[in-house]
Amino acid sequence: MSSTPRVLAVIPARAGSKGIPGKNLRQVAGRTLVARAVRAALAAASVDEVVVSTDGDAIAAEAVAAGARVVRRPADLSGDQASSESALLHALDTVATGHDAPEVLLFLQATSPFIDPADLDRAVARVLDGAADSVLAAAPSHAFLWRVTEDGSALAVNHDAATRPRRQDRAPEYRETGAFYAVRVVAFREARHRFVGRVELVVVPASTAIDIDEPHDLALASALAPLLEVAVAADSDAGAAAAAGAEVEVEVETEIELELELEIEITPATARAGEMPRPDTAAPDVPARSRDRTDAPAHAPAPTDPHPARTSAAENGAP
């Protein structure tokens, strides 16, 4: 983890939950939601410290076991009406003061079980390099949205109902997933909300953009976890194999070059001025490498949003 500039990750996880009692301690693929969030934050190279803000003893114990520091959230910031911002500001006040104040606050929600640490690093980097003041996770969507009016009729929201273009002819819109937000601390303290200054997106796959708010969300995440995590493991193995292959390739090439140098040794008796003697044995054929490889497409098709009209965690109260 880097030490300068300082990045603080905060995971609000209160004990009270109406939709799914004890939600933050429910498991997906054998790990609790709060532990999954802590591990994702710890795996991000840009994060210096991970804090869980909670009012629950069991959640606090789970957070410590996963490697996080715990900030005890007071009762007045733990109710259904308390905002996420209030918990974040309390955590900042508790953890960081004076010269130790972090430059970037990384806010993660445990109800998003498939947070990629690489996406966290991308969000933090946007804030640190000055490109943005606030960055949020969002999934692409081509959904046609409708709203029900007071008289019960349907009203098209993001499209002209008289025109129905093909999916490939429509630019994607982006749905806030609620998984994570990176924000400049100074601006966040002044505005007291997470969307400050220039706001940008880190686009995440729609297949992983699951927000656990109802029991069926938990069942869906549990069903998808083996598929998603096997795919991640396969990608990691492929990357390691490619790196190992590149090392072997370099070693073989070096050995061939060394053999040729030994065979083409120049001596006064055999070399004329400006001419190299021919080796006794022909150079071995070296197979073509990178120039013959076919690269993967630069841009894969945009994933399909499984819940295009679903309300994200970002629209609910504090997690």
Image (cartoon, rainbow, N blue to C red):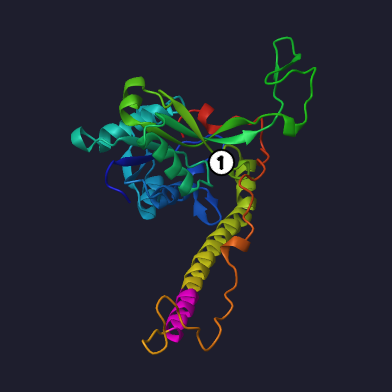
Rendered location of residue 99, percent (x, y): 19, 35
Q: Kindly identify the residue that appears in the image at 30 percent across and 27 percent down.
A: 186
Residue bounds of the magenta highlight: 251-264
Judge the density around disc 1: few (<14), some (14-19), many (≥20) Cα neighbours within 10 Å.
many
**Height in image: 96 above or below 261?**
above
Q: Secondary structure at mark 1?
A: loop
Q: Kindly identify the residue that appears in the image at 51 percent across and 33 percent down.
A: 201
Which residue is tagged 1? 204
Q: Nearer the viewer, residue 253 or 28?
A: 253
Q: Amino acid at mark 1?
A: Val
The verdict on residue 260 being magenta is: yes
Rendered location of residue 61, percent (x, y): 37, 50
Based on the displayed image, in which of its 4 quarters is residue 305 positioned? top right
Please give left or right for residue 231 compared with residue 67 in the image: right
Seen from this angle, which residue lies furthest left?
98
Q: Kindly identify the residue that appears in the image at 65 percent across and 33 percent down.
A: 141
Rendered location of residue 14, percent (x, y): 42, 37
Please give left or right for residue 87 compared with residue 263 in the image: left
Rendered location of residue 85, percent (x, y): 39, 27
